[in-house]
Structure formats: structure tokens, C-alpha cells
């Protein structure tokens, strides 16, 4: 495969003040791997003066359209406001998985999900019939995965960094 | 429409110690609305003795198969281990949305996402150029929605409770 597949850059980077600069850097790193990075903010949307619900609808529709146009997804699965990844990115992994597009994840080094939840819960986890439960009684998944098994199994792998994810995604295209 | 559509019951209830009893009650409430509730644990999986990663793979494949067999999804979008919903459920909303299946959400009354994050952040939010940011610099979405706009816009509505979600889902089937 000699073309440069487009990949959707799923992750919470859209919420950074310097998101556009971050996007440019990410796209350069995509290009270095023979990929074209597509950032969620790439759609030219005219949101000015529109009610918040309409803005949200336009952003949603633009993002799923971009996923549909891409050949695969690189997803930032690092912990976000809690022990799990950004849930908007979890949604997008699910969306891409249903479309049969390859998804590769990457995450900051925060251990497996049980380790993350244990740190988040501050020692309130308890053992109950061979399972770990948090202070509200919810079982804590313990499959050695980086997050909830739906996302962690939907991705081909969870790499240690963005460049490693790009290399894995490029390999996924090349083996087709 | 006189049949009884199957709906997938997405949510963190699978993590409750009494999950099977909860599932039975939820299915009775589905039946009362002319719907057949399908719980994520309904697949008869033989997980005994299998390595955790294999168990996770089998559960993942069973769940996406169940979503594929259902006509729609009712999704519990209540806050889970943080200001956002269970990310596994966010994944499933995305998966169902990509398949074009109607999804209705419901959530415990926790206000809009900004309100949730403000409570979670304990007063550390700051105003920056007309946008709210948390202590790590991540912008906090402020669209008046219950969660990240991807999930909140993918669903037809976010109802106050499970029965209201079932009624909305039943109406979605009836209008077809």
C-alpha cells in the first residue's frame, strides 16, 4: 500500500488551549509514518451566534463524518478526569469499531485499570468473593487491560506513545 | 409496530454484586413497555479457567454481538467514577450509533456536564478567554448537555429515569 491513509486523531487534545498547535505537531508525526492525520477540529464549522445545542450537534456530525472518511483511528486512551480515558474518545472508538476501521490506542504510563482505580479510590477498594469493588459497590474490572474491556479489546493494541501507535496503525494498513 | 423489539441495556449495572437480580427487574420494566430487554451478561459464556485477556475478548465479542441483534439501546449515562458516564457504555453508544440503531439515554439527576465537573474539581475550575478549564488545563465543555457532546448528541434524548427512556425508545420504534 503506497498511498497515505487518513487517520482520525481521537483524544482529548481538542480541549487544550493550544489545540491547534498540538494538532499541527501530531500531523507532522503522522506524515513521518506515511499517514495523513485528521484532527477533530479540522472541519470548517461556522458556530458563531448559534445556540450551544446547535453547536454541539454540528460538532458531533462533523466528527462522525471525519471518522467515516478516515481509514483508521489513533486514540489517546490516557486517563482523563478519573481512572478512565476521555469518554468522548471511548465513543469514537466504538463508532469506528462498528464501521470495521482499525483502531490503535496509546496511553500515558498509568498501569492497568485496577491499578488506576486503586489510586483513584485512595485505598477504599475491598475484596468481595474474589472480585475488587469500589466504595460504591461497583466491581473493578481486573483483566490486566488498560481500561474497560470494551475499548481495550476493540483496539488492535494500546501503545506506550503516539508514534508507536502510528507505526502500529501503518502496519495494519500495510498488511491488508 | 406490534412486535416486541429487543433493546440492549447498556450501563454499569453489570458491575453490581446483585447484577442478575437487577437485570431481571430491568427486563420486567422493558416488558411493561412492550420491549424485550437484553442484558450484557445474557450470553452464556464459559470463562472458567481461561486467561483474563481471553475472558475479556469473549465478553467483548458477546456484547457487540448482542448490540447487533438488538433494535435499539437504552443507556445508563449516570456519572461513574468521576464526572462522566461509564466509558464502556460510551463505547457501546458509539457502536450502536454507527450501526444506525436508536439510542435513548437516562441519568441520575446530576446536572449538566459543567456542573458535574465543577463539583468533581472542587473549585479548581478557572475562566480562560470565555471558556472553563480544569486544574490540568483541559477545557470543560459547556453546551448544557449531560456529558461529552459525542454521547449526548448521539442519543435521541437523555431521560430522567429508566422507565422514561423505555417509553422514548418504544416511541422511536412506533414512529417508524
Image: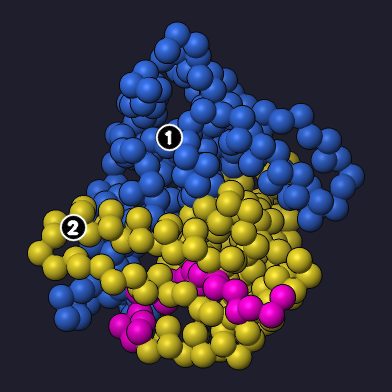
Chain colours: A yellow, B blue
Where residue A94 sits in the image (x, y, percent)? 55, 53
Using the image as rendered, state which of residue A141 and residue A126 is in the foreground.
Answer: A141
Residue A6 belongs to magenta span: yes
Does residue B109 lie above or below A79 as drawn?
Answer: above
Q: Mark 2 points at which residue?
A: A52
- Residue A72 picture quarter: bottom right
Give the left or right position of residue B40, taking residue B113 as reference: right
Q: Which residue appears farthest toward the left when viewing the image? A: A49
Task: Report if the CB atoms under discs 2 and 1 are less than 8 Å apart.
Answer: no
> Compared with residue A65, is residue A130 higher up or lower down, i.e. above or below?
above
Q: What stretch is highlighted in magenta?
A: A1-20
Q: Distance between the residues labelled 2 and 1?
A: 23 Å
Residue drawn 43% across the image and 35% down it: B102
Please name the residue shown 33% across and 49% down the image.
Answer: B153
The relative height of residue A93 versus residue A39 in the rendered view (above or below) is above
| Quadrant housing the C terminus of chain A | bottom right
Residue tagged 1: B102
Q: Where is residue B97 in the image (x, y as percent from the top left)?
A: 47, 44
Q: Which chain carries label 2?
A: A
In the rendered picture of this protein, how many numbered marks are placed on residues? 2
Amino acid at each position: 500500500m503506497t498511498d497515505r491513509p487518513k487517520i482520525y486523531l481521537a483524544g482529548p487534545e481538542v480541549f487544550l488551549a493550544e489545540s491547534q498547535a498540538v494538532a499541527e505537531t501530531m500531523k507532522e508525526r503522522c506524515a513521518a509514518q506515511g499517514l495523513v492525520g485528521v484532527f477533530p477540529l479540522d472541519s470548517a464549522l461556522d458556530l458563531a451566534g448559534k445556540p450551544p445545542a446547535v453547536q454541539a450537534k454540528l460538532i458531533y456530525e462533523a466528527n462522525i463524518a471525519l471518522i467515516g472518511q478516515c481509514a483508521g483511528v489513533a486514540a489517546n486512551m490516557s486517563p482523563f478526569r478519573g481512572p478512565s480515558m476521555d469518554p468522548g474518545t471511548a465513543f469514537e472508538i466504538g463508532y469506528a469499531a462498528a464501521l470495521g476501521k482499525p483502531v490503535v490506542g496509546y496511553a500515558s504510563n498509568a498501569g492497568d485499570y485496577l491499578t488506576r482505580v486503586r489510586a483513584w479510590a485512595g485505598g477504599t477498594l475491598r475484596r468481595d468473593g474474589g472480585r475488587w469493588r469500589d466504595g460504591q459497590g461497583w466491581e473493578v474490572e481486573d483483566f490486566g487491560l488498560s481500561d474497560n474491556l470494551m475499548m481495550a479489546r476493540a483496539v488492535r493494541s494500546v501503545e506506550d506513545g503516539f508514534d508507536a501507535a502510528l507505526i502500529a496503525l501503518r502496519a495494519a494498513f500495510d498488511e491488508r
